[in-house]
Image (spheres, rainbow, N blue to C red):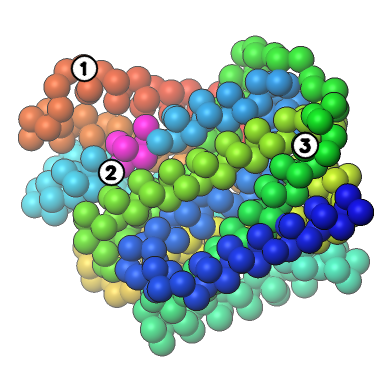
Amino acid sequence: MGDQLVIGAAVLVGAAVALTLIFARFARTESWLATVTPLASIIGSGFLICGPLLAREFGAMAAPAMIALLLLAFVVGSIIRFNIAHAEPVLAEISSYHPLAWTARIGQGVLAAAYAVSVAYYLKLLAMFCLRAIDSHSVLLANGIVSAIIAVLGVLAFTGGLRWVERVADASVSLKLGLIAGMLVALGIDWGRTGGAELIPAAQVNGHSALLLLGLLITVQGFETSRYMGESYDRETRIRTMRNAQLISSVIYILFLVLLTPRLGQAADTEGVAGVLDVMESVTPFLGAFVMAAAVTSQLSAAVADSIGSTGLSIELSHQRLNTATGFLMAGALALVVTWTTDALEVIAIASRAFALFYAFQCAIAIWVARREGKAGPVRQGFVAIIGILCIVAVAAGAPAEG
């Protein structure tokens, strides 16, 4: 009877959340559509791997560690929001040979490479999950699935601009959030019926765990996509919806880690997506299907979101010479090259460092603009410099979080 209660509650809540996000009036507003893209990228595969990783590295301190990571990400996001408001106008006015313009272009080049890797990585994971259903491990078939998805998204971009592509992200995010809501309800009921009696590992924090936490920055990465959606949304909308996306994702991550507390010992003995699958199936076997579906929708929505960010980045790098369709085509072509010439599961560590390096460039730009425009005092500039140094440490020494 207990399992039936868990299953019923998970299905009902999951369906209610998904249907609300798909059919509610607010789901068709510009504000929600602008929120979906960064939200989709933030809640990618990281949602599935953070639990086991943090449980193993931090024990009972897993939830506080997650909060610390989210605070760091939110601060980095606030720096990018500052750049949307104040650096974008400056970059539009200065000469392309100005040192600040070169700094921005180098950072964008780093981000373009990271996006290409991450899109290929997300879609390859999606293909692998799909192939598990037929017990296949064919790399050729997986690459074919990735290519087909990129081709379909390219057609949508050419026929309807980013709006159609955003609809794909919107639908997959709605389903993903419904599945996550169901998983959270199931974990909450499980905690209530077991009384949290599972053995919780001892709290631990050391140098390696701190470096791994910096490496985990990629698992909450994605908010920067708002910076490159200027073709579709004004600055105020992008700033507001980027903040909303980070707040929504933070609530989800924290709830998941807190509700996972009674099973941290079990989670610590597992790894990756399969680890979350084992934990959820121990609550009730049916929840394994929730994890599999959440994994597939997470990869699709994150890949679409990063493709949108890459498109906006291509348009900005071309000084508006490219339009949305051609920008998306270039982003897709780059992802295809990565898909067919590399093993994205191995090079994702490079993408992790590339994102951190891009954030460091954003910190440098923010400091320069703040000094030139008088938008922030020495204390705030010093704080941004410290965040930039942390990002550089993540580039140099952050332990790989994915792959």
In percent of the image, x 79 and y 20: which residue is there? 201
Residue 142 location, x and y as percent? Answer: 74, 68
Residue 173 location, x and y as percent? Answer: 55, 63
Disc with the residue nearer the chain's start (3 vs 2): 2
Q: Amino acid at mark 1?
A: Val
In percent of the image, x 53 and y 29: which residue is there? 67
Q: Residues within 10 Å of mark 3 (few under 14, many from 20)?
A: some
- Residue that extends furthest to the bottom in the rendered view of this protein: 159
Instruction: Give yes or no for contact between labels 1 and 2 (Cβ–Cβ under 8 Å).
Output: no
The residue to which callout 1 is attached is 379
Q: Amino acid at mark 3?
A: Trp
Q: Is residue 324 above or below residue 241?
A: below
Residue 264 picture quarter: top right
Q: Main secondary structure of the magenta part?
A: helix
Residue 205 picture quarter: top right
Q: Which residues are magenta?
A: 75-80
**Is residue 18 visible to us here?**
yes
Q: Amino acid at mark 2?
A: Arg
User: Nearer the viewer's eye, disc 3 or disc 2?
Assistant: 3
The residue to which callout 2 is attached is 81
